[in-house]
Image (cartoon, coloured by chain):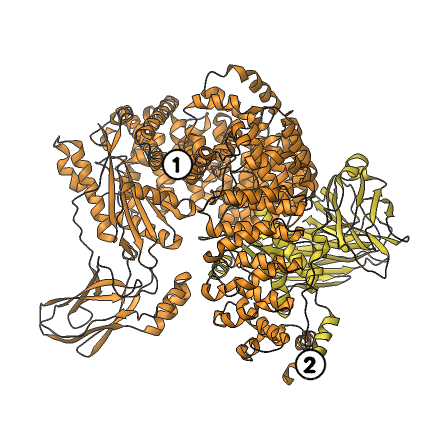
Amino acid sequence: MLEKQMAGHRVDRSICAWFWDYVLSQGGDPSMILPVIASPTHYLFQLFRDGIIFLACTQVEMPPLMGIEFLCRVADVLTDYLGGLNEDVIKDNFVIVYEILDEMMDNGIPLTTEPNILREMITPPNIVSKMLSIVTGKNSNVSANLPDATASCIPWRKTNPKHSSNEVYVNLVEEMDAVFNRDGILVKCEIYGEVQVNSHLPGLPDLTLSFSNPSILYDIRFHPCVRFRPWESDQILSFVPPDGEFRLMSYRVKKLKNTPIYVKPQLTSDAGNCRVNVLVGIRNDPGKAIDSITVQFQLPLCVASANLTPNHGTVNILADKTCCWSIGQIPKDKSPSLSGNLVLEVGLDKLHVFPVFRVGFRIMGVAFSGLQIHKLDVKNTPSEPYKGFRALTRSGEYEVRA
Amino acid sequence: MFHQFSATAESLSKASSLVLRIGTDAHLYDDPDDVSIGPLLESRFDSEKVDALKRLLALLAQGSDVSQFFPQVVKNVASQSLELKKLVYLYLLHYAEKRQNEALLSINCFQKDLSDTNPLVRAWALRTMAGIRLHAVAPLVLRAITKCARDPSAYVRKCAAYALPKLYDLHHDEDNSSFEELVDILLNDHSPGVVGAAAAAFKSVCPSSLFLIAKSFRRLCEILPDVEEWGQIVLIEILLRYIIARHGIVKESIMFSLSTMSTTPVADGFPTFSGTSGNCQTLVGTTCDVNMITLMCKSYIDGQIECFAQTGCSNSNDDKLDLSLTSSTNDDVVMLLRCTSPLLWSHNSAVVLAAAGVHWIMAPRENIERIIKPLLFILRSCQASKYVILCNLLVFAKAVPPFFSQYYEDFFVCSYDTYQIRALKLEILSIIATESSIPIILQEFQDYVKDPDRRFVADTVAAIGLCAQRLPMVASACLEGLLAITFYESSLSSSSQIDGEAGVLVQAIMSIKAIIKQNPDSYDRVIVQLACNLDRIKIPAARALVIWIIGEYSVIGQIIPKVVPSILNYLAWSFTSEEPDTKLQILNTAAKVLLCAQGADSLAFRKILSYFIELAKYDINYDNGRMHHEPGGKILNGKMHSSISSTKSSRIYLPGSLSQIVLHAASGYEPLPKPCSLLNTDLTAGVVNETNDSDISSGSSIEESGSVYDSDHSSISSDDGNESVNDSNDTESTALAVRNDVQDVREKTLVDVSNVNVCVDDSNENTKGNLSAFISTDLAELMPKLALESWLDEEPGVSSIQTTQQASSGRISINNLNCTVTPKLHSLLDPTTNNGLRVEYAFSYEISTISSMLVLVEIFFENCSSEPIKNIALKDGESSLSVESSDQVLGESESLLRTANVPPVLSTEEIASLDPGQRVKKLIEIRFPHHLLPLKLAVTCNGKKFSTKLWPDIGYFLKPLSMNTSAFIDHERQLPGMFEYSKRCTFKDHIEKIAPVKDDSSIHSDKIILLSQILASKVLSNCNVSLVCADIPVSFNIDDASGLCLRFSGELLSNSKPCLISILVEGKFSEPLVLTVKINCEETVFGLNLLNRVAAFLQ
């Protein structure tokens, strides 16, 4: 299914057909396609997200990152509005999608992309409005008034949110990127983290957030609401938050020495057979339970058949030769292992390519980088709000080469 | 619906989604047509109208044309319901341009809405009014924008700014001043949101009116962090352009340090700055690639073409650089840098890259490093942007590798990266590797070699080779690794053929070759090892490479000369079973060995060589068969392999630009303005600097052609290509270099004489070809000296005079060649397959008067039998089938064909009877499904039906378009970049025709005119185009045809788009000529197919 929106000069729909042909000619996997493509008539930017391809085209010079970022933003906003992205959900709400796109982009220039403002202009679909539409037979998702924030100098916040609640949650979500090389040595280990804030505060609150150990932050990026000066001088985050959930800051912590779990794959091959043995265990106890542990790897193309059995958890081998071993939590009494045999294709004696094992896990309650929030001050609110803090570490690009 | 509730999980989920979808618009999307929309639109209730409009929107989203409801929809524009209004607007925006008259009805409503109390209504009215693109209302829109630019609501002002480009797009021929005035007002707005929008308007309406920025520069800088992210991207770029135009390049920046360094050697006087450049050199360090940065900053400022043109004439350059300097303490510069540096923390990666671009160009060298970390951090955002960022990082890394050398870890490949990202990372890694980081990087590479993606492994192997070349200390270690890979791969590929392994093996040997080349003497053992494993290496390309290496270094060290004879014996034994490529290299190697051989050996070698040549003579492959005529030229084939590994073209565009990603200048791309081109008088008077404008635009319009040249040039001078020659004879190579210079000079004069940009282009290609011609003749020269005259029929020494003579060449252009056109006859029906009816066809030069889809074909019926044939008719074969096949292949033309509704064959009446020997000509009009696909036809005669196929000739999908040379060049310039493609081929037909004239010492131009005639008639016999002109170089050399250029023009039958063909000739009359065919055409697919066709019939 193809959605589409015009701005300025008309772009013929046939460009989509061209794009499909191109995708097929490149192997048919949209996630492997270059994000910037020069077609005979247009330059295309494409983004593949959750099975939906977002395509933008231009005929003139423009920053390609701007196009891609915008598509990302569209995808984010739609996901936010529709509670997920898939073909059905877009079909169901195509009018809203059209209205959102019209509001986000005007004549090829992004217009309103702040989710807070958009929500005020176009009401997101929800159960209540659905029910209402069934009962009364009419519904309008277009707001009658222009959000005041469009005029204010903090365009990310509605001016007058009404809440029964008075609370703010700060969430540290960290993703661990690690690479073990074929000798089992940790080549690279770093944390990509985000400070996610969910704020439901009345009025125009002014927040300051400080860390106990800001020096470990290697790289940082901020939401536009963060004031630069206080960070530059005191490394304090001072901001007027948008309403609802948003990403206040993202950061990177480099050169970590430890990983919470170890995965030790062993592959030995001779005479057309390959013996596989994968061991998983806790290397460095973070103090909280490690759950949702998975190990995933792609069997090499030259493997004819595979027979793998785990002593814990389940193993699935998919049609594209992806092997998924879901372990869950590591049991106390034994360390999980996966062993089995791969039969190589006829004529091949030894395995000459080795798979990369992607590891997934999740640790609730721990920010593995060690980043600690010192305190959060809220000013300019009628009463002291409830403040909540949480942390989560999960695996990012965590891989072990066999 | 009941059956859906069966027990499978799948249908359960379907059912649940059905329940969830109640109350949404899904039913509207799935069956928008289930009720008739018309009456709904006429309904009294808003809700029903909304329903109708949603259905229309659904149809519209699915691509169907629902413009027939336009009048009914327009009526609803006056509605008070906002939702209805919004939907009507969405519909209007989509169809207004098509239904201009009806759309005018809505204008009054917009006018009324513009004074509504609700700012949202005002904004929507303005957006829609500007968006419907009606020429008639442009003045009204302008008035509306003027009004809204002073609206109390910032949102409306923002929309006013957005409306400006729309109106400008519609109407931009009129006086620009009213637009500039509006942009000025909006830029000075106090709301950051409006300023961002105004920046976007500025960029599309008046990008060169930088004086508008002057008065509010500081305010703009201050407001920059508060502007919304999309506005920031545009505003940063505008501010950067302003600074360059106003103050010039910063003295302490990379741009300056390098441009002086680069100009110093060319312009040998540069006393004032020589000190500075020296400093910079130490600052930058020894590893910094000066050429690269020179190229970079020149292309930033001048665009590609001018940066080349300036290298020779440095005088103007001096002045400009003198003027254009400013120091990093300049207040404006400091301001801009200060205000953009917090943007490096933006969560929008496009903003980060834009801000980094400013620092890259403007910041003092020692402060640039601060942009590196943010740039590396945005790599973690999303896969799509990762690629774009890496493309930009690659340029930065190439320019100043030390900046990145400590961050090598960030470029390590992980399994989540796509192939393109991996390739970019590898390239960056091989550039930034230093002596301290190389062990870790190599360790990492060792892991990559075992990756399942073999294409990536091949790239890794290439990267190892590059690292070894850059860092000689690891060369031997790398070589060992590469040898191990080679042996391993060769053992693998012998046991079973696996995809991609061949690529790895070939790449490994190529890397080995590159390393050996740096220091052949110390690697003789490696060569011997390779040679000993020759029989295990089965892949032809890899074998060819190894054989080349043996030939190249046959006299190095002590061991190799000893093993060479046995290798040659082995090759002699295996010659007949080798692939053509390998055979070429065997011949090549044998010849080289013979050249270097001394004493008794040479006799044996000579025997082997003549044995090879004897074998080659009877080779099926024409190339090989022909080789014994000109082994000198063929030795060059070694270069074919080496050029694969040569680095990608070094085209550079501004950081963050689209052009940098697609590596050609996208339309609308402009390099930075000329330093200090914005004069103080402009600022005070507020007048547009017109000269400056035109300057810039002309620069960008011909950019593409220049950049093509640029890459060509570098590939020549990189001496990668001609290494095979150079290495074998040092003195010869220096001589070559000298010639190269001469060549450059010649080029200059050529450019000056003709003063036409296209000529620059042509002569450039010319040089390239000539150079290779020189190389080959040099070799030819070399060989007779070594007593090989026996099988060489070339005269030595001809070419050496040639260059000097060419230095004084001019051009004559003629456009009236009396050439004969003989259309080719194709056979449609062979008399032997039926009862003696021969049907032939030729494409006609006439143009169909019925439809532009039709191609006229002349059909000749001839009775070859002894009896009369009756009732001959020509019909469309299987109409249904041909439509189907057209469906599969056709893209854009498909819809055209459908609407045209023309039958495939407009056949003529039957031929009642055809007597023996009689020949009848009929003209039919044919609509081909595609310019490459045949049309099935059926010939009936005597009541029998013979089906056959009529193959289209792409050359006849054109009609002649007459124009003069300057119009041609104009058109050519309008079709740069992806609309221009070229191909080389050899042309031999002239030899026999010109040969009789050869001894006759009549004037050279006769020969060249004859050649032009031959070429022109060849083209005109195969394409329905018209000859524009033939440019004939005036040369004193009798045998040289180089520089002859023929131009043809035509337009596409289907859409009348121009299609230009240029043919450039290189080489000598007495030998096969090398032709470069270039086609400029907007229809890329058609153009490429035509190019192949032209190249095919010329060959």
Left or right relative to B24: residue B1051: left
| Disc 1 residue type (three-letter) | Gly
| Disc 2 residue type (three-letter) | Ala
Between residues A229 and B1099, which one lies in front from this camera angle? A229
**Residue highlighted by disc 2:** B7
> Which quadrant of the figure contains the N terminus of chain B?
bottom right
Q: Secondary structure at mark 1?
A: helix
Left or right relative to B1044: residue A97: right
Can residue B406 be seen? no
At 49% from the left and 51% from the top, the residue drawn is: B169
Between residues B84 and A291, which one lies in front from this camera angle? B84
| Residue extending farthest bottom | B2
* Number of the label disc, if any, that sits on residue B638: 1
Q: Is residue B309 above or below residue B946?
A: above
* Number of the label disc, if any, that sits on residue A222: none
- Residue B367 is drawn in which quadrant? top right
Q: Which chain is yellow?
A: A
- Give the alpha-carbon distance from disc 2 to disc 1, as whole Å: 69 Å
Q: Position of residue B415 (x, y in %)?
A: 64, 50
Left or right relative to B568: residue B1006: left
Q: Is residue B496 above or below residue B490?
A: below
Q: Position of residue B1070 (x, y in %)?
A: 21, 36
Between residues A71 and B739, which one lies in front from this camera angle? A71
The chain letter for the residue carrying disc 2 is B
Q: Which chain is orange?
A: B
At 57% from the left and 28% from the top, the residue drawn is: B247
| Residue extending farthest right | A384
Q: In this rendering, which labeled residue sits more in front, label 2 or label 1?
A: 2
Mark 1 surroundings within 10 Å by alpha-carbon count, few (fewer than 14), some (14 through 19), many (20 or more): many
Mark 2 surroundings within 10 Å by alpha-carbon count, few (fewer than 14), some (14 through 19), many (20 or more): few
